[in-house]
Structure formats: structure tokens, C-alpha cells
Image: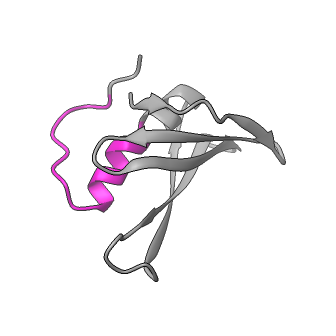
Amino acid sequence: MANLTGMTRLEAGAVVDEVDVPGVGPVPVRVQRCPAGWQATFEVRDAATSDLTVTHKLVAPTYREAKGAVPQAVAFLLGRPVDAPVQIR
């Protein structure tokens, strides 16, 4: 899992944090309960075109899995190869 930056806070029933994604930098992540488990919501911006942002939501059975999947989801959205399973520590 990527390094955490230590800016965790509780906001409107969700845990808001930043995940440090290698090659991208800190990505703000909002994790909250949902009917299917835990939902992680984050945005990816293209540095070349500041007006393009992709908001993505992923769902996992546990908080740890939802937050741990964010770095690979970011890599996938940026078109980078994702060839290893998510490592949950």
C-alpha cells in the first residue's frame, strides 16, 4: 500500500485522507460505508490539461481494501500497467 501523508480527518461521516501514489503524489481520498461495503472516492487530474478531472469510486468489502486499492486504480486510470495484485499491509 502507498504511504499515508498523515492528514486523516472525519468529515460528514467519511474518513478523508491522502494516499501518496508513486509517480503521482498525494491523492485525496474519501472512504465511507456503503450498502456493498466500503467506498473510496478520489479524483485524478491530468497535469497537462488542468481542466480535465476524473472522479472515481471503487467499492471493497473492508475499509483497508478500499483504501489500499486506490494506488492501482489511479495507475489504471492513467493508463499505466497494473500487473500485480493489490498489496494490503
Query: Left or right: 26 with respect to 35?
Result: left
Q: Residue 78: where, in percent of width, then height?
A: 28, 61
For image coordinates 25% across by 31% down, the residue present is 85
Residue farthest toward the right in the current orientation of the protein: 12
Question: In this rendering, is residue 21 above or below 77?
Answer: above
For image coordinates 21% across by 61% down, the residue present is 79
Question: Is 70 a magenta residue?
Answer: yes
Question: In this rendering, is residue 2 above or below 81?
Answer: above
Q: Quadrant of the N terminus?
A: top left
Q: Quadrant of residue 62?
A: top right
Q: Residue 34: where, in percent of width, then height?
A: 69, 45
Q: Quadrant of residue 84?
A: top left
Query: Left or right: 41 with respect to 10?
Result: left
Nearest to the observer: residue 30 or residue 58: 30
For image coordinates 30% across by 41% down, the residue present is 22
Question: Can residue 54 be seen in this snapshot?
Answer: yes
Q: Residue 45: where, in percent of width, then height?
A: 43, 68
Query: Left or right: 27 with respect to 85?
Result: right
Q: Quadrant of the C terminus?
A: top left
Nearest to the observer: residue 63 or residue 42: 42
For image coordinates 32% across by 43% down, the residue present is 72
Question: Can residue 62 be seen in this snapshot?
Answer: no
Write down the region rendered in magenta.
69-86
Question: Is 60 a magenta residue?
Answer: no
Nearest to the observer: residue 76 or residue 7: 7
